[in-house]
Image (cartoon, rainbow, N blue to C red):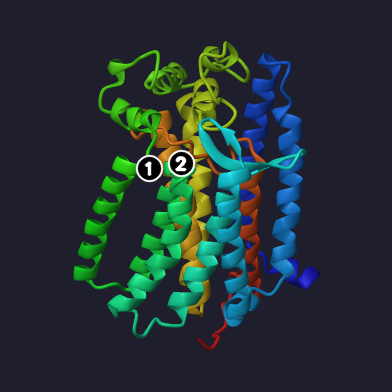
Amino acid sequence: MLTRLKKFDWVLAGAVLVLCAVSLLVLYGIDQGTKETNYFGRQISNLFIGLAVMFFLGFLDFRIFKNYSLILSFLYIALVAILVAVLFWGTKIRGTAGWFDLGFINFEPVELAKIVILLLLAKYFSGRHVEVYRPRHLVISALYVFIPIFLVLLQPDLGSVLILASIWLAIVLLSEIKKRHLLILLFGGVLVFAAAWLFFLAPYQKARILSVFDAARDPLGSSYNLIQSKIAVGSGNFWGRGLGQGTQGQLDFLPEKHNDFIFAVFAEEWGFLGVIFLLSFFALFFWRLIRASLRSSNNFSKLFISGFAAMIFAQVFINIGMNMGLVPVTGISLPFLSYGGSNLLINFAGLGIIQNMISESGGNASFKKEEE
C-alpha cells in the first residue's frame, strides 16, 4: 500500500486540496453572514467522502474498465436508466428536474454521466486508434453521447449538455480526426444548438443567453445574476475586501453565492491578487494532468486523462466566464470550489482513476511501456 501511495502524483493531489481549502474558506465566510446555513460543515463531509472515493479508485486497477467491455456496458445502461428515472421522479431545483432527493444528499445523475462517458469514449477510441479516421466511428461515438445529452436536455440542463459535448469533442480531436470530418462536426453542432433553442430550452434559459449581449434589457430579471456577479468581481479591486466582508455576498445581492457564483464571492473578498493565486493552482492542476497524459504508455489512459482535463477546463471556463459576464449563466459549478456533493464526488472519482493509471505505470517519474 505504501509503495502504491508513493507512486501517486502528490503535486496534483496537493493542488486539488489547496482549491478545496479555498472553497472551505469562502463557504465559512458565507456562513458567517447567513446563520441558517452550514455550507462549511457539510462541505467538509463532502470532501472526506470525495477523498475516500479517490483513494478507493486509486487502488482499484483501472484496467477493469480498459479490458472488460461488459462492465462499461452495464454502467452505460444503468446511467441511461437513471437519467430517464430522474425525469419522472427527480426533484426540480431552479427549474431543472435533475436531482434525486436521497434525504441526506441531493444526487445529480448528470455528474455520473460525465465519468461514464469519459470511460466509454476512452475505451472505444483506444481500441480503434488505427482506423479512427473512418466516419462510422465518429457516428457511433456520437450516438453514445447523444442519448445522455438528449435526456439531459429534457430536464432541461444546457450547461451539463455543453460539458458532455466538450468531453466527446476533446477525445475525438485527440484521436486525430480528419479536418473535413471536424467541419462536419462543427456544422452538426450548430444544428443541435438550433434544435435545442427551438424545442428544448425554456424561456428563462433563452433570456439568460440573450442577457450576455444586452444586460440592460432585463436588469431585475434574466440579467440580475449577471449584473450582481460583475459588481462583486469588480468591487474586489487588487487586495479584496477581506474574508466575509464582501457586500454582494454578505447582503444577499448575489444569488447562489455558495455554488454557481462562488468565484464572484471569492473575487470580491480576495481581490485580483486572490484570483491570480486561485488561477495559478488551477494551472498547476492542468499541467500535472497534461504531463500525466503525455507520459501515458497506452491510449486508454491518455484519452481518459486528456478527456478529464478537458471536462474540468470546460467547467472552469464556463463558470468563471459567467461570473464575469462573458458567457450565459448556465448553472455550471466551479470544480473543487462550489458547494455540493455530486460534482465534488465525481471529480474525485476521476482523480482516483487517474492516480491509479499513474501508479500502475510506475509513477510520474517513469511510465513503463505497456502493450496497447
Q: Quadrant of the N terminus?
A: bottom right
Q: Residue at x 73, y 60 (%)?
A: 55
In the displayed structure image, the side of residue 98 where residue 206 appears, left or right: left
Residue of label 2: 156
Name the one closer to the observer, 57 or 283. 57
What x and y, as percent, mark residue 304? 51, 67
Circle 1 residue: 200
Which residue of the protein is positioned furthest toward the bottom in this rendering? 371
| Spatial CA span between label 1 and label 2 | 7 Å
User: In the drawing, does residue 284 fall left or right of residue 318?
Assistant: right
**Disc 2 crowd, CA 10 A, few/some/many (<14, 14-19, 20+):** many
**Do we see residue 108 in this rendering?**
no
Q: Of all residues shown, which one is farthest toward the right?
A: 1
Callout 1–callout 2 Cβ contact below 8 Å: yes
Looking at this view, name the residue that lies furthest to the front.
88
- Horizontal placement of 61 versus 311: left or right? right
Q: Amino acid at mark 2?
A: Pro
Please tell me which residue lies in front, 184 or 357. Answer: 184
In this view, the residue in front, 277 or 71, is 71
